[in-house]
Amino acid sequence: MARFWITLSLASVARASFDSNLNYNSPSRRHPSLGIDVPRVVKRGLDYDSCDHDQLNFTHGVASGDPYPNSVILWTRISPQKANDNSNVTVEGNVPLYSHETEQYIKASPNPICVDYQVATDKDFRHVADKGTAYTTSDIDYTIKIEASHLEPFTTYYYQFSVCGSIKKSPVGRTKTSPDRDDDVTNIGFAVFSCSNYPNGYFNAYGNVARKDKVDYIIHLGDYIYESGKGTMGKDARATNPAGEIFTLYDYRTRIALYRTDPDLQLSHQKFAWIPVWDDHEVANNAYRDGSSRMNNTEDSFIKAGGVSVEQRKMNAVRAYFEWMPIRQVSMDDNLRIWRAFSMGKLVDLIMLDTRHYDRSITTLDFNNEYISDIKDDAGRTLMGSHQENWFLGQLSKSKDRGAVWRLVGNQIIFSRMDNSAWLKGGLNADQWDGYTASRNRTLSHLYTNQIPNTIFLAGDSHANWVSDLVWLDTKPYDPVTGSGAIGVEFAGTAVSSSGYGRNYTHANTVSRRLVEDNRELQWAEGWFRGYVELQVGREEVVAKFLGCPTVATRNPYEISLANFTVVAGENRLKRSVAGGKVETGALQRGEVRGTNLTVDTETGQWKVRGFEQMYIQY
């Protein structure tokens, strides 16, 4: 009887430690057919010390994210293998290699791996604020994601994982909690990223932010990975793995794991708490509620995808994303919801949207572009679904009512009207808010009608830099010289490594000049450099610094300042003169484009940055 109770007690402790690993909730604990059957995992055995510690490694560093005032998400991966779990890979006849319903899978899976973690206010872990134990298995690709609690607001912490009963430890990570909603905070720094395409170049921008160490948090607006394949393993340094387009859970796990081998991305995760949201390429290009540009609910799509349906592919992508990203699962029972908000003191409310997958009406899929252009003004089209849209507009009003100084809206795609005739056939990109006029009009109407001040939209996706006054053209008066009539500002940033517009530097600047001529609310455009945006949010003003990488063809720490912009609290527009009247490159509505640190090599015709002559601009 005593042995029975000891065994029962051990099982209870184990179950509690399994529960601490949030990835067993992915994609949903409340739906066993989609999630992980934890009691079945626990039954595999309680002999956790039988693991060969020498075979275990922290394969992809550490990460943290989704900071709250008293808690933060911590992540790592501890595995006996570098490769990802292939339990859902199919063989001939679409028969699973392993099945959760067979003993074959249970016998093939190793014992659960036990990991301890601790969080402290010092690097030496003398002042421990939280600690605990968690387990992982191949079911969740050996990932561990826990919520560190009992923390103080707006405080820097250090954390580390270690294998239970072993001296093997992970790298030490650093993170930071958010301010409490009523804290009087004077300044918060963010670095804003999007569109990191592994085979297209090195992730220098991630590393530059970590090396400078001037921000508090990272905002990632999506396209953290790309689903397409490129290059040859063993031949090309940045070849994709798997080699081709990805569809299965194993594919998505392997692809995101490849991206996480980049040392600059690892460094960024190790030093900052991330607040990410997905764009389309985390699943597939131009994804929407019911499909994507290359895969829709048709028999042909099913066959081409190796027997994977649209719904299953999306579930595979989402599950891998939540396993590998330091992110809270807000409500996975709500149609794969990722949209959420963060109140950071009295200073700022950060609202993160999903304008891609949640409930978006059909978008441009190449074959239907003219049709989408014809129906873009249809009142029945929705960019984010009524549930998310009502929540979003409510968040804007609640933020104003509680007295927060600023509202930052993190979304994937450009909000402002954009005539792209300078570089895009037809001029309209209906995959952006331009293809969902009714959704944009309702948002603008809410901002103007309720006089909600100090709203700044953040956008990624386009692989270029765009800075605009936020205006309701043809409905509200607007003076582009003074900015009078605007209700806010939009900062859209370039990619980490994905290609921009323009065949070369000169052509890119020519396109930029056309763009600012064709769009009177667009104050600056630039489409050549890869990089990021640094936001310093203060009580009196927000300063946005656009930084560019001279090249992503090699790994290097170089960057140059492209342009700086200021938004003064209460003015709801870009401060005039815009960018202080000077930018380094691109095109400015009114002012000087200096270009003084850019020269051309007369022999090669390539542009280079003065002071970085060894680093040619090439993609």
Image: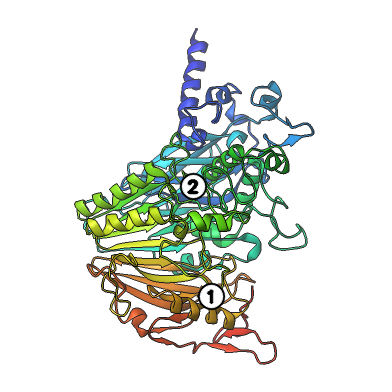
Outermost residue, top side = 1
Density class for disc 1 (Cα within 10 Å; few <14, some 14-19, many ≥20) is some
Instruction: Using the image, determine if residue 71 lies above or below residue 351.
Output: above
The image position of residue 416, as x and y in percent, is 40, 64
Q: Residue at x 64, y 71 (%)?
A: 554
Marking on residue 361: 2
Instruction: Using the image, determine if residue 282 lies above or below residue 135.
Output: below
Outermost residue, right side = 92
Front residue of 478 and 85: 478
Residue 451, picture quadrant: bottom left
| Element under disc 1 | loop
Density class for disc 2 (Cα within 10 Å; few <14, some 14-19, many ≥20) is some
Q: Residue at x 58, y 50 (%)?
A: 60
Colour approach in the figure: rainbow
Tell me the kind of residue under disc 2.
Answer: Ser
Marking on residue 200: none
The image position of residue 377, as x and y in percent, is 43, 55
Going from N to C along the chain, the mark reached first, 2 or 1, is 2
Instruction: Using the image, determine if residue 575 lies above or below residue 216.
Output: below
Q: How many marks?
A: 2
User: Quarter of the image containing the C terminus?
Assistant: bottom right
> Is any atom of residue 431 visible in this view?
no
| Element under disc 2 | loop
Residues tagged 2 and 1 counted as in contact (Cβ below 8 A): no
Tell me the kind of residue under disc 1.
Answer: Ala
Distance Cα–Cα, label 2 vs label 1: 27 Å
Left or right, 446 with reference to 598: left
Q: Residue at x 59, y 25 (%)?
A: 47
The image position of residue 296, as x and y in percent, is 62, 44
Q: Which residue is mark 1?
A: 422
The image position of residue 20, as x and y in percent, is 45, 34
Front residue of 473 and 391: 473
